[in-house]
Image (spheres, grey):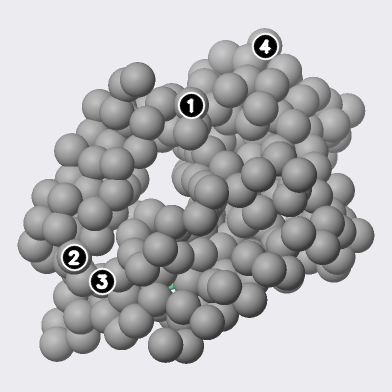
Amino acid sequence: MKKLFELKSVSKDFGKLRVLKNINLTFYEGESIAIVGKSGCGKTTLLRIIASLDMPSSGEIKKSTNRIGYVFQEDRLIPWYTVLDNLLFVCNEKKTALSALKLVGLESFHNYRPTKLSGGMKQRVNFARAISIKPELLLLDEPFQSLDLLTKTKLIEDFSNIIKKLNISTVLVTHDVREAVSIAEKIYVLAGQPATIVDEIKIEQSQKGMFNPGFIEIEKKILKLQSS
Ligand SMILES: Nc1ncnc2c1ncn2[C@@H]1O[C@H](COP(=O)(O)OP(=O)(O)OP(=O)(O)O)[C@@H](O)[C@H]1O
């Protein structure tokens, strides 16, 4: 299996603040993983290092692809562009952009401006934009934050199905164990201050689904790891 990236003893400091310490992680093509950690523990920092938007302070990152789709935590759509133009800004091909919008169920909204869309719809556009470049690696930074439970549940189901259908290698960072269990096949637990990976948990198919009680055991285990 092809390695898409490998983090070796990665640490990150912001001035005197050490945020990440000794992160080791090898990610293979076809995998779908989640990195779970408390708010402020360094998840976005880690994702930015994987995307080469930031550099480690020490250690190294090796990557075999630069075709990376990134769904940011905050809405990064250009408000005065239409939905379609927001996608064309990164993917150049109208047919590809429209088919990405179709996948997320928003083809008929291609002429709308983002300001006319709900929070959930905007996240669908963000996701469509990220997959429109046909990424080898998809990075998701808490894409379901600040959505109501019903919208979030539907979005997780839809994104998860698209990821499977297109077989996109995906890294999700989140503080929400339920989201992680629903999307990923494996969870890496980030804990401590500075944060490091303290455990790896494989997710069984039988534990999947937003309302599957299987996630409670995993959540208990992760909370314990984060508080010790
Ligand atoms: N560019 C920066 N300069 C200085 N400090 C930073 C910078 N980026 C992040 N930090 C600090 O690093 C720590 C980790 O931030 P980060 O955003 O990676 O955490 P997070 O786990 O993604 O948080 P959240 O879940 O709230 O989004 C925080 O204390 C933050 O203030």
Cα distance in 3D space between marks 2 and 3: 7 Å
> Is residue 22 visible in the rendered structure shown here?
yes
What residue is shown at x 16% (from left), y 51% (from top)? 8
Nearer the camera: disc 1 or disc 3: 1
Of the 4 image quadrants, the one containing the N terminus is top left
What residue is shown at x 32% (from left), y 75% (from top)? 195
Confirm or deny contact between disc 3 and disc 4 (CB under 8 A).
Answer: no
Q: Is mark 4 on a helix, strand or loop?
A: helix
Q: Which amino acid does label 3 sit on?
A: Leu
Q: Which amino acid does label 4 sit on?
A: Lys
> Is residue 79 visible in the rendered structure shown here?
no
> Which of the marked residues, 1 or 4, is nearer the chain's N terminus?
1
Q: What residue type is labelled 2?
A: Asn
Ligand 1, seen in the image, is in the quarter at bottom left
Residue 20, which numbered label?
3
Residue tagged by mark 2?
A: 22
> Which of the marked residues, 2 or 4, is nearer the chain's N terminus?
2
Rendered image quadrant of residue 217: bottom right
Residue 49 lies, in percent from the top left, at 28, 54
- How crowded is the residue under tag 1: few (<14 C-alpha within 10 Å), some, or many (20+)? some
Nearer the camera: disc 3 or disc 4: 3
> Which of the marked residues, 1 or 2, is nearer the chain's N terminus?
2
